[in-house]
Image: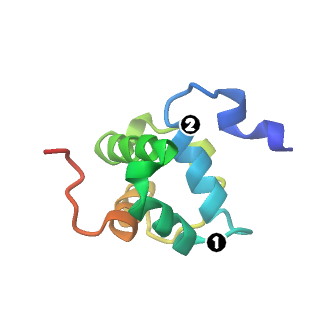
Amino acid sequence: MDDDFYWKRHPGGPFATLIKVTTTYLHPEAGDLESLQERARDDADDPEMRVFKDELRQAITSPGQVPRGELFSHVVYDDGSPEEFLRRLWRDLYGDEPVAEP
């Protein structure tokens, strides 16, 4: 079953880190937003979280490029749309920090 994960099938694929990290912490069986928030606060020392943040930025600005079946089949959200989920996730992790880099 674990071999079915997108990031294992396509380790260099687009948004692989976003999908992996989001699935790890926000899968219905994990439901661990608090731990993901802790990692996000310390992302300067965490190369995986720096990639995650960059990919989340890209997903928010170009949501049509995210392999939706891969991300949204593994997380639970009730935001109304995948785009709203991504924007809420940004706010949950990075607060008022602008999505666009300065």
Q: Earlier in the sequence, mark 2 or mark 1?
A: 2
Where is residue 5, by image quadrant? top right
Residue marked by disc 1: 31
26 horizontally vs 84: left or right: right
Indicate the secondary structure of the residue bearing disc 1: loop
Residue 77 higher or lower than 67, as above or below: below
Residue at 64 percent across and 72 percent down: it is 31
Label 2 packing within 10 angstroms: few (<14), some (14-19), many (20+): many
Label 1 packing within 10 angstroms: few (<14), some (14-19), many (20+): some
Cα separation between marks 2 and 1 = 19 Å
Q: Give the percent coordinates (x, y) of residue 102.
A: 13, 45
Residue marked by disc 2: 16
- Between 63 and 41, the residue placed more toward the observer is 41
What is the residue that sits farthest to the front in this orientation?
Answer: 45
Q: Give the percent coordinates (x, y) of residue 1.
A: 86, 44
Residue at 61 percent across and 71 percent down: it is 32
Q: Give the percent coordinates (x, y) of residue 2.
A: 82, 43
Q: Type of residue at label 1?
A: Gly
Residue at 70 percent across and 68 percent down: it is 30
Q: Give the percent coordinates (x, y) of residue 42.
A: 42, 60
Q: Type of residue at label 2?
A: Ala
Residue 97 higher or lower than 73, as above or below: below
Disc tally is 2
